[in-house]
């Protein structure tokens, strides 16, 4: 028997939507304020997953000014066998102030999972987490959360379903309200429709995307319901299986639902797939807090649970419980021989790695390229990293609690507002930056540190080192929320600043939109540059390595 180890996709990979086309499996995940947007992963065995592309990578969305945790939410992948088209629905959350949650939802299609994708087709602004269902009769339906803003009404709203026009966009007929969840956990969202036999099944996320999160299910013989709740009255997958009544709670961390008996927390937001062997799995998000804390620096990750259908045609976990597990049984007859590594090694010998993402702005050759200085990634400095407009940052997802990120950078600044280096990043208000800059007092390049914590600028004025050579190697050792900063000019690595507490670079540790519990997006590692002088400086990065320990 082969076993699958969770999470199957570590680091920022939340809201997974899974499909199978022939013998290949695909997962799409949320990306929030990061570009390119919507990650797409591929697998043959459900255990090893590779990032193969992004669906929004040609400027289709403008994420400048996006406040944490808004941006691109909950992509939903589907495949229409009648037309052999891949469909991708997603929400662009443009405002969360006042808990108004203004979100525009779109759909795109492609003949190949790697694109090209069509231009986004507007569907609705009624809420968020859209999912498309292709019925056997050729009709298409859209399920989504209708966001409720009125005082005294059911929060956060109701699940609604309508027929959708995929040719021209928009809704056909009227919305049909289903309910506000199938259990007492409340906060129903992320509805997805499936059909098996005579039943339509509606899978939803519930309990808020925190420690009470779960996957719920209902069924009906008509697509518009009414939907019958699972007979257990509880989520079919969760990390915290004890009973919770939280109807009317629009969303919350529910820290009281932390389960001390399992490493996996926040299991919820599920998506169903049938394998080539006739087995069933649910892909869902999860989190792993730092030991002794409720902080989750790796954000919400993707995991799998094996499922089966009862004789009464209800979906349940294969082991008969509803507690999500860190290891699950693989497909029958499958041989899992290799394990995906989420290390990063890029020597910039050609183009830069697909794993690089950028906050708020698009990646463009004019500010980040491997052509002007072959064998290097040249980054032109732009805004301060406090900016939500044009930060010059190339970043990769943190995927482990213990790792090293290392680079070599050549940089010759001539003004104190010109910097280049390596760092840890959550959003524009929260980061740590080991960098080169210019010292007027010493009339030379120096190495120093700058930090952002909950929007406060922290300058390490006691940490300044003259740098004789133009190029220097820099390293950050991250160990369970603590960072050591090192440099190398000759043979040996030297400690520059040690024991920096950075556990706040986590979903619960940052200052997200007022009314929200931090963010959803997770820790990243980055290289980047700033030029608040003449915008004529650049840094050449010789390599970028991330080694998980």
Image (tube, rainbow, N blue to C red):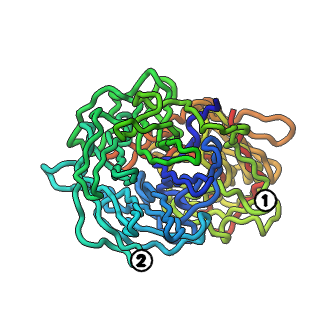
Along the line of sight, which residue is nearer the eye, 289 or 529? 289
Relative to 517, residue 37 above or below: below
Closer to viewer: mark 2 or mark 1? 2
Q: Quadrant of the N terminus?
A: top right
Q: Earlier in the sequence, mark 2 or mark 1?
A: 2
Relative to 341, residue 201 above or below: below
Residue at the image position 45 percent from the left and 59 percent from the top: 72
Q: Residues within 10 Å of mark 2 (few under 14, many from 20)?
A: few
Q: In terms of image quadrants, where is residue 412?
A: bottom right
Image-based side of 123 in relation to 318, left or right: left
Q: Residues within 10 Å of mark 1 (few under 14, many from 20)?
A: many
Q: Residue furthest right?
A: 491
| 2 and 1 marks in contact (CB < 8 Å) | no
Residue at the image position 53 percent from the left and 42 percent from the top: 279
Q: Secondary structure at mark 2?
A: loop
Q: Position of residue 69 (x, y in %)?
A: 41, 51
Q: Quadrant of the C terminus?
A: top right
Q: Position of residue 260 (x, y in %)?
A: 43, 22
Q: Position of residue 173 (x, y in %)?
A: 24, 72
List the residue tagged with mark 1: 376
List the residue tagged with mark 2: 167
**CA separation, marks 2 and 1?**
44 Å
């Amino acid at each position: 028997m082969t076993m699958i180890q969770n999470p199957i996709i570590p680091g920022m990979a939340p809201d997974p939507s899974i499909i199978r086309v022939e013998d290949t499996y695909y997962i799409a995940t949320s990306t929030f304020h990061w570009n390119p947007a919507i990650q797409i992963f591929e697998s043959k065995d459900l255990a090893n997953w590779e990032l193969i592309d992004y669906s929004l990578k040609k400027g289709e969305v403008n994420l400048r000014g996006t406040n944490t945790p808004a941006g691109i939410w909950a992509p939903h992948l589907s495949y229409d066998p009648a037309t052999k088209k891949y469909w991708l629905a997603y929400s662009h959350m443009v405002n969360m102030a006042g808990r108004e949650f203004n979100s525009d939802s779109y759909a795109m299609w492609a003949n190949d999972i790697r694109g090209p994708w069509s231009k986004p087709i507007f569907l609705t602004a009624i809420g968020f987490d859209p999912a498309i269902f292709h019925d056997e009769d050729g009709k298409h339906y859209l399920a989504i959360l209708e966001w409720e803003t009125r005082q005294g009404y059911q929060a956060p709203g109701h699940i609604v379903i309508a027929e959708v026009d995929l040719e021209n966009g928009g809704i056909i007929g009227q919305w049909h309200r289903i309910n506000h969840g199938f259990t007492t956990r409340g906060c129903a969202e992320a509805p997805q429709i499936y059909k098996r036999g005579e039943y339509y099944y509606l899978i939803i996320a519930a309990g808020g995307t925190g420690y009470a999160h779960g996957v719920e299910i209902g069924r009906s013989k008509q697509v518009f319901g009414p939907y019958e709740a699972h007979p257990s009255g509880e989520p079919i997958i969760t990390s915290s299986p004890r009973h919770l009544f939280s109807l009317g709670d629009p969303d919350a961390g529910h820290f009281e639902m932390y389960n001390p008996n399992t490493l996996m927390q926040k299991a919820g937001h599920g998506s169903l797939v049938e394998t080539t062997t006739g087995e069933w799995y649910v892909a869902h998000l999860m989190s792993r807090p730092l030991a002794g804390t409720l902080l989750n620096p790796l954000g919400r990750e993707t995991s799998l649970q094996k499922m089966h259908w009862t004789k009464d045609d209800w979906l349940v976990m294969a082991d008969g419980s509803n507690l999500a597990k860190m290891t699950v049984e693989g497909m029958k007859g499958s041989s899992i021989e290799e394990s995906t590594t989420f290390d990063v090694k890029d020597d910039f010998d050609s183009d830069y790695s697909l794993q690089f993402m950028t906050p708020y702005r698009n990646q463009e050759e004019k500010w980040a390229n491997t052509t002007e200085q072959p064998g290097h990634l040249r980054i032109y400095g732009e805004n301060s990293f406090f900016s939500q407009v044009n930060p010059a940052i190339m970043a990769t997802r943190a995927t482990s609690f213990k790792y090293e990120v290392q680079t070599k950078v050549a940089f010759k600044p001539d003004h104190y507002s010109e910097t280049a280096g390596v760092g840890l990043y959550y959003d524009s208000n929260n980061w740590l930056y080991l960098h080169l800059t210019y010292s007027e007092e010493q009339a030379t390049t120096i190495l120093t540190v700058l930090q952002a914590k909950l929007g406060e600028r922290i300058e390490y004025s006691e940490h300044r080192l003259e740098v004789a050579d133009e190029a220097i190697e820099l390293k950050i050792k991250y160990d369970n929320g603590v960072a050591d900063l090192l440099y190398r000019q000759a043979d040996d690595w030297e400690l520059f600043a040690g024991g920096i507490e950075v556990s706040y670079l986590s979903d619960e540790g940052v200052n997200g939109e007022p009314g929200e519990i931090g963010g959803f997006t997770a820790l990243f590692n980055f290289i980047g540059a700033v030029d608040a002088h003449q915008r004529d400086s650049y840094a050449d990065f010789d390599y970028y390595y991330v080694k998980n320990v």
